Every structure is written in structure tokens, then in C-alpha cells.
Image (spheres, grey):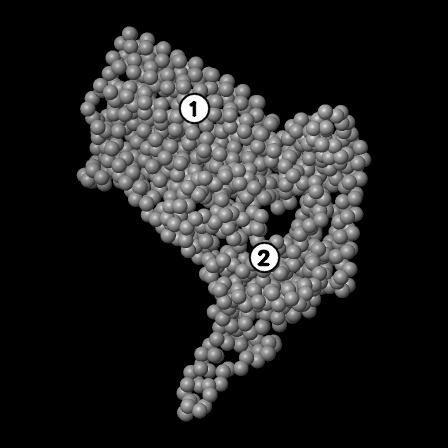
Amino acid sequence: MSAINPDTQTKNNTTPAFLTALWVNAALLAVEVGAFTLLKQKLWRIYAPRTVLPPPEKRAQELPKGFWRWIPAVLLSPTEDIIEKNGLDAYMFIRFIRLLIMIFSVFTFLTFASVIPADAVGIGSDQDLNRISWTNITDPRDQIRFTTHVVVVWILTAFVLYMINREMLIFVHLRHQFLISKSHSRLAQARTVLVLPVPEELANEHDLRTFASFVPGGIDRVWIYRDTKELNKLFERRVDACKKLESAESKILKTATMAWRLREKQHKKTQKRKLKDEEEVDAPLVMPPPSREFLDDLVPSIDRPKHKTGLLGLLGEKVDTIDWCKEEVARLNREIKDAREHVVKGKFLGSAFIRCNLQLGAHVLAQCLSYHEPLKMYSKTMEAHPKDIVWRNLDDGALEMTTRYITSWAATFGLILAWAVPATFVGSLSNLSLVCTQYKWLNWACRLPKYGQGFIQGVLPPLILTIFFALLPLVLRALAWYECIPRYSLISISVYKRFFLFLLIHGFLITTVSSGITATIEDIVKNPTDAVQKLASSLPQSSIFFLTYMVTQGLAGAGSALVQLGPLLLHYIRKWFLGRTPRQAYGVTFRMPSCDFGTTLPRFSLLASICFAYSVLAPFINLLALLSFIMFYLTYKFLFTQVFDQPDEMETGGLYFPMAIGNLFVGLYIEHICLICLLVLKANAADNHYRIEAIVQAVFIVVLLVLTAFAHIFILHSYAPLGTYLPMSLATKKMAQRYAKQKGKSGDEAENDDIELDLFSNRHRGRNVRRRLKTTAKKIEGKMGQTEGKIILPNGAVLSRRGSERSNHSKASTSSKDSKKSNKSKASKKSGKSSLKRPVIDDAAPALRDEDSEEEDDEPNDHAFDHPSAYVDQAWVWIPKDDLGLSEILVQELRKLGVDASDVGASMDHKGIVEVTRNPPDEDWNGGHDM
């Protein structure tokens, strides 16, 4: 009996600890929500950037004004709009939170209606939280009460399994519709497969095409990744030199602007002293025409930017930054051009990108058994996007990749073991009131006021745990990178798996165990044979820690995500300290934040697992979970509709969702195993009659555990292939409908008519050739209205054309457009002094979009999966247009040296603050920015 009685002192301290955490986090929530309602009216850049910054077709509707009207507007807005605005990953994230709300609504109703009465009615008069938990039933004669817990666990588990199966069906349907949708299937990435490691005998395009000749529709393009280390080094050095040059040019313009402003002030003072009579007129300071002499007069040689050319800029010769960078970029441009013309095909690095003519062909290729030898062509990934490729992770062989994989995960498990020390400390801190009575050096803690101890036990442990786990993703991302994962999106998925494993072990299991150890450590030392019984019986007592953890995450955590204090502070830091060049100002003004699902979603999976485990042991946690997930639903739906902009290249098509669903089973397993152990301990401590009751109850939970495992295996094997690849039934049906449309038949006629599709005909290859010819014709036509080798900007400036990437620029703008742009530029200088004001969109800037691309295909880049160093031209040096006109002088000097430069879309006011109205002038512009 003594082995299973809860400690009286623990019971007496649970309520103060919980109430302290509740009041502190409720106060934080009130402050955060109040700050949000005030700031969102003024700071649209932080709280509503999606209403202004994206392209018009992807902008969100503005929310109603007021302190509370935005809440029903967010809740009632169609959740499906998130798919169009931010992709399927974001939509499934919101749907996962909604699933948890539905689950814990049922959990709360059922446990409050049955489990809490079974725990509390007719047992004691203690008003502590333990009265409505498992620990309140201590008399063996009340063993029959646990039957309620067993029945409720069966019902709740069945409901969870039903909801999981239902949501997986919906997910599979949504993913398939997403893959075959017109907006996605037309993308080149929908037909591209990354294959590695490829054997040497297939290291050429002809053999790879022969190898993949069985693919329906045939192969469009093949890229073989070869070693170009020297060219890569030149390319990276040019990128660094261009950034340094932009920074120096902006700095010298700011110095000149401030120097002229100082001269104007001194001139006014001088004029005031010279005024002797009223008839004399105050003569303003005359600004000379822009020239190099004027610039040198304002910024003498001693004030020009300088740097050292040695290691990390600390050693070596000190040189003028602008002069050095101009020569360096011009020289690197010549060397890169020469290297590209005489490029020597280097060592094959084992990777190949294969783009199929048909989306179905890519999915077939990705699923086939490719090679007859082990560790060859075993890794094939779909949906490869050029911006998603980690080029440095494509140069390792199969043996090295396997070794890195093993080493990476070994380091992850080693880090888990090392992390046990701080996690155990946090768990011990949650039971400080017990530890302080057993160790003299902690007696001071016992003398603290009741609510002082409550603060230490209820507030500090979750806070410390949150800080620890905020630093962890950085380490896990480095380990995933070391694993040699070839895509950033897959790195994020790997981080998800590692992070959830950490959260589960340290944020739940070790914290629970350490909390139980501190509650029974003295008895364990005195009577080691009863250690297991004492430890297991103390596990439910650690629920107070997770009650406070749910309060911290659900109240203060949701409020913190809503008010976005971190992004708000980071915005001002970047604006005033990092927004000194147009490119940096563009990042501050136009780039919107995004959600990292690899680190955000595991936290919700952990909260769900914790609540599953304690759903019948401490039923009050279900209500806290319900309130928390409602807060998170409101917060993240607001963020995905008004704030976040998910990068298209990081879209996985909802692949995080099956992992999150799988994590829910972990919580069910922990719940069942914990109940089995507790019922067995009850049986060991009871008389024969009550022992049989406990054993029967434990057997029912064992059966439930087995059934849950079978359901998990069934769902895993049923949905795993469907959740990854596009089924042939949908792909061929879509192709048949398209074929019928080309033949002039309606959809109903197509279904009733026998349509024979020949997926191996030359029709798809012919379409490919036509598309390439069409692309070439557009490029030739685009050159007709331009001077040979020249391109004309809207401001009339003529630039040299040295790269194919600039061949798509529009023709010279008319004078009316120049006037329109000039007026907008002036308006920008007057009203655009803060990046928190709505920016002036430069619609007159040249756009590179292809409006005449084919209906079913975008216009793929022939260099899409070559290393950027092999084809990407020098990024234009972007200089802000200043009031003195000196930027034109600097741009002309750069162009004379063969360095592309422009001051379009960027301006510097009389205080030296840089503002932008568009993205860099050498990039596509469609009236908004879309990450």
C-alpha cells in the first residue's frame, strides 16, 4: 500500500505551482494579445504583408479594423485558400491542428463526464488537483473504479484511429489533386527525378537515355553533374566581390549625401551672419552637375571605403574597396567567360537529373528498381527544384553517403545521451519541494513562500526547457546537412524526425522519469527492491509539470507566435543595421517570413503525445490541450493568410503530415504501456480479489495495445505509397481527358469512348522539340527591336548584353512610361521613408514573364540543373539613386569596365536611408514579390 500512496507534500504543492503558472502565462497572453491588437493597426509590414507584397493574384484580403473583428474574419475565412496562397504543406499544417482540436474536444467531454467522477466522487475531501487524477484512487477496494478508465481508453483510442484513417484518406486525395493540378503539373520540377549514385558506365547522356527508355513518354533532358571546382571558386569569389562592391558604392553615396547636407547647413548659417539689411536675398547653395570631381570633392580619398585583402579582412594590403572590387569583378567576369567557353568536363560526381516528358513517366522512374548491383542508383527523389538543390552534397559516392548517414545518426543519438543532463535537471526542478527536504544545501528552497516555490516549480522548468530546445534545431540541421542530403526540403524533413525524437525523449520521457525519481529517491535508497514499484507509482504525479507545460505553450506560446516579437525586433535590427544597400533594403521591405515545418510541427506532435499519455491519468490536461490548440489554430491561420509566404521550392506537397500522424501513435503507445504498468503495480499491491480485477483491466489494455499496433501497421502500409507517388489511375485518366479534349470530345464522351493512349509514341518528343523551337523563336524575336548586343532600360540607359539570361528583357519603354516611373520615384522619396509604410510598386519596371507559354508546360530552363557557376551571369551591381545624381556617374564607370550595374528601383533620401520599390533590376518583376 505504501508503495502506491501519493506523497502528501506533493499533493499540497501541485495547486500553487499550477495556479502560479496559469496566472503568469495568462498575464503574458493578455499582454501579447493587447500588444498585437495595437500594433497590427500600424505595422502592416509585420502583421499583414500578404495584403501588399505578393503578386496581385496571391494577395490576401485585408482584415477588418478593430480590436476583435479580425478574430471571426480569420476563423470564417476559407481554409482552402491557404493551398493557393502558401501551398499544401501549410494547409495540412492547419488541418493537423484542426484534427487535434476535434480529438481533444471528444477527450475533454468524455473524460470530464466519466473519468473525473470516477477519480473524485466519494473519495476524500482534498481540493488539490490530484483529486481529479489517477493518484486520488489509493484504496484497493476502489479498484473497480479503474474500469471506467479502461473503457474510456478503448473508446478514445477507437475514435483517434477513426480520425487518423479519415484524415489520411483526405490527405491522399488532396495530395493527388495537388500533383495533377494544372498549376503544379505544368512545372518542370513535377517531371524531374534526381538519381544517385549513378555508376560510371552510365555517366553520359546517351546511356542514361537508353537506361530510361522504358519510361512512358520518354525523356526530355538529362543533366550529369561533373566536377567544376575551379569554376565554382571563381563564381563564388565574384558573388562575394559584387556584394562588397554594392556595400562600398552605397556607403560612398551616403557619405557624399551627408557631406552635401552638412554644407547646406553651414551655408545657411553663413548666410544668416551675412544678412545686413532686409533687401538682401538669401542665396541658396547651388548644386553642381554630377561628376567624378564633385564626388571626389564631397568624399576625399581618406574617407573612401577601404579594406584589407588578406585573411578575413584582417591581414594583407589595405586597398580602396571600390577600385579593387571593380577590377576584381571585371577580371573574374573575363575568367569565368573564358572558363565556360573552354570548360573541361571534370570527374563525374555520381548524380544525374532526369526530366521526363510526362509527369507519369517521372513517377514510374522514381519507383523502379534501377540497377543490378547494391548501392547503385538506390536513391531517387521526385519534384527536384533547382533552388532546392544542395550542390555541395552531390559529390559523394555511395560508400561515403552511407558512412555519413550512420555517423550523422550516431551523433544524433550521442547528443540525446549528452542532453540527458540538462533535461534531468529540469525534471528535478519541478519537484523542488521534495528535494529540498532531503538535501541540506537546498533547505533555503523549503523556506520560500508557497507561491515562490510554485514559481520555481511551475514556471521555470517549462521556460528552461523551451530555451534549451530553441537552440537544438541549429545543431540538428548541421547534422542533417552532414548526412549528405541533396535537397533543402529533405533536410527539413530530416530535422523534423530528429527534433521530434529529441522532444519525445527529453521533453517527455526523461522529464517524467526524472520527476518520478526525485519524488521517491529516498525510499529507493532505503529499499532498492521496491524501486520499480515506487518509480511507476510516482509517474502520474509528474503530470503537474506537463499541466504547466501545456499552459506555457498554449497560452504564452500561442500569444508569442501571434505578436511576433522576435520578427518585429529582427525587422528593425535588419532595417537600421543591415539595410544599407538596395539588396539588403529589398530583403527588409519585400521578403516575407516563412514557417519552418521541420522545427514547428514536432512541437505540436509532442504536445499531442503528452496529452494522449495523460488523458485519463490527469483528465484536466485535455481541457488545457483543447484551449491551447484553439489558440494555435487561430494564430497560425492568421499567420498563413496574412503574414507567411512559403517558398515554392521548399514545397513537399504535404509530406510532413503523414509523419505528424505517425507521431500520434507514439502518444497512444505511451498511454497504453503506462496504464498496463500502473495496473500491474496495483495488482501486486492488492489482495487476491482486487488483484484479479487489476489483472483483467491490464489484459484489456494489452489487447488494446496490440490492436493499436495492428492499426498502425495497416495504415502505414496502406497509405505510404499513395502518400508519395502519383497513382497511374489518376495520371492516365487525366491524360485521357486531355487527349479527348484535343480530339474535340467532351468529358462524358471520353469516358464512354475507348481511347487508346500510346505513351511511347514520338508525339511527346515532338511536342518537346516544338516547345524548344518556340522558345528559340521568342529569343530571336526579342532581339529584333534592340540594338545589336544592347538592352534598353525604362530610363533610357543602354546596357551591354553578355548573357543569355538577359535575352528576355522587354523592349525599351516609351517616354510616357518613363514619366510615370519618374513620378512614382518622386512619390517614393516623399512617402517611402519607412519600410513599414506601404511601398510604391514599380509597375513600369521590365518584366521577364513569358505570357505565351504552353498551357500544359512551363518554359523549362536548359541550364536548370547545371551548377550555377556554369551559366548564371553576374548579378547587377544595384546602386541607390541619390538626390545629387552621383549614382549615374558610378553606374557609368562600372559599365565602362564591363560590370553590369543599375540604379533602377532604389533611392537614397537626404538622410542616407535606402528605399526600394521593386526587386533587383536584372530579375523578373510582376508587381509583387513571391518567395
Q: CA distance from mark 2 to mark 1?
A: 50 Å
Q: Nearer the viewer, residue 212 or 760?
A: 760
**Dot 1, how many residues are within 10 Å of its Cα: few (below 14), some (14-19), or many (20+)?**
many
The quadrant holding residue 513 is: top left
Tell me the quadrant of the picture where the N terminus can be found: top left
What SS does tag 2 mark? loop
Q: Is residue 252 visible?
A: no
Q: Nearer the viewer, residue 717 or 27?
A: 27
Q: Position of residue 697 (x, y in %)?
A: 36, 13
Q: Amino acid at mark 1?
A: Leu
Vertical relation: 70 (above or below) 105: below
Q: Residue at x 79, y 36 (%)?
A: 763
In this rendering, position of residue 324 left or right of residue 365: left
Q: Is residue 765 visible?
A: yes
Q: Residue at x 69, y 60 (%)?
A: 333
Q: Residue at x 60, y 59 (%)?
A: 843
Q: Residue at x 77, y 63 (%)?
A: 788
Which residue matches tag 2? Answer: 919
Which mark identifies residue 668? 1
Q: Position of residue 37 (x, y in %)?
A: 38, 49
What SS does tag 1 mark? helix
Q: Are marks 2 and 1 in contact (CB under 8 Å)?
A: no
Vertical relation: 141 (above or below) 518: above
